[in-house]
Image (cartoon, helix red, strand yellow):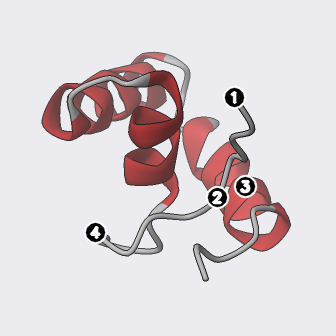
């Protein structure tokens, strides 16, 4: 099974959370909710992680 972590075409901002959900087989809305909660409870450091992933993850094409 050859799978890659890529941005999803089902995107709200850049497709990072949806790409992670597709990679692990999780529900996209739950992944986004967990990410939002983690971002709030870690003093918004999740924003920096999201930007890094947005730049590092390749597109799904």
Indicate which label's residue lies in the foreground, 2 or 3.
2
Q: Is residue 46 placed above or below 40 in the rendered structure?
A: below
Q: Spatial distance from mark 4 to mark 1, Cα to Cα?
A: 22 Å
Q: Depth check: 25 or 20 in front?
A: 25
Residue 33 image point, x, y percent = 21, 30
Residue 49 image point, x, y percent = 70, 45
* 10 Å crowding of disc 4: few (<14), some (14-19), many (20+): some
Residue 53's label in the rendered image is 3
Choose top left, top right, bottom left or bottom right for residue 22: top left
* 10 Å crowding of disc 2: few (<14), some (14-19), many (20+): many
Secondary structure of the residue carrying numbered label 3: helix
**Residue at image mark 1:** 1
Secondary structure of the residue carrying numbered label 4: loop
- The residue drawn where x is 44% and y is 64% is 8
Indicate which label's residue lies in the foreground, 1 or 2.
1
Residue 25 image point, x, y percent = 37, 24
- The residue drawn where x is 47% and y is 74% is 14
Split into 4 quadrants, where in the image is the N terminus?
Answer: top right
Upstream in sequence: badge 3 or badge 4: 4
Residue ranking furthest to the right:
56
- The residue drawn where x is 62% and y is 52% is 50
Upstream in sequence: badge 3 or badge 1: 1
Q: Spatial distance from mark 4 to mark 2, Cα to Cα?
A: 12 Å
**Residue at image mark 4:** 10
Q: Is residue 51 placed above or below 4 in the rendered structure?
A: below
Secondary structure of the residue carrying numbered label 2: loop
Q: Mark 2 and 3 residues: CB-CB less than 8 Å, in contact?
A: no
**Residue at image mark 2:** 6
Q: Mark 4 and 1 residues: CB-CB less than 8 Å, in contact?
A: no
The reply, left or right, for residue 33 in relation to residue 34 is: left
């Amino acid at each position: 099974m050859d799978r890659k972590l890529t941005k999803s075409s089902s995107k709200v901002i850049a497709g990072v959370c949806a790409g992670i959900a597709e990679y692990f087989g999780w529900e996209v809305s739950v992944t986004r909710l967990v990410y939002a909660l983690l971002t709030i409870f870690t003093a918004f450091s999740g924003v920096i992680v999201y930007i890094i992933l947005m730049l590092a993850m390749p597109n799904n094409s």
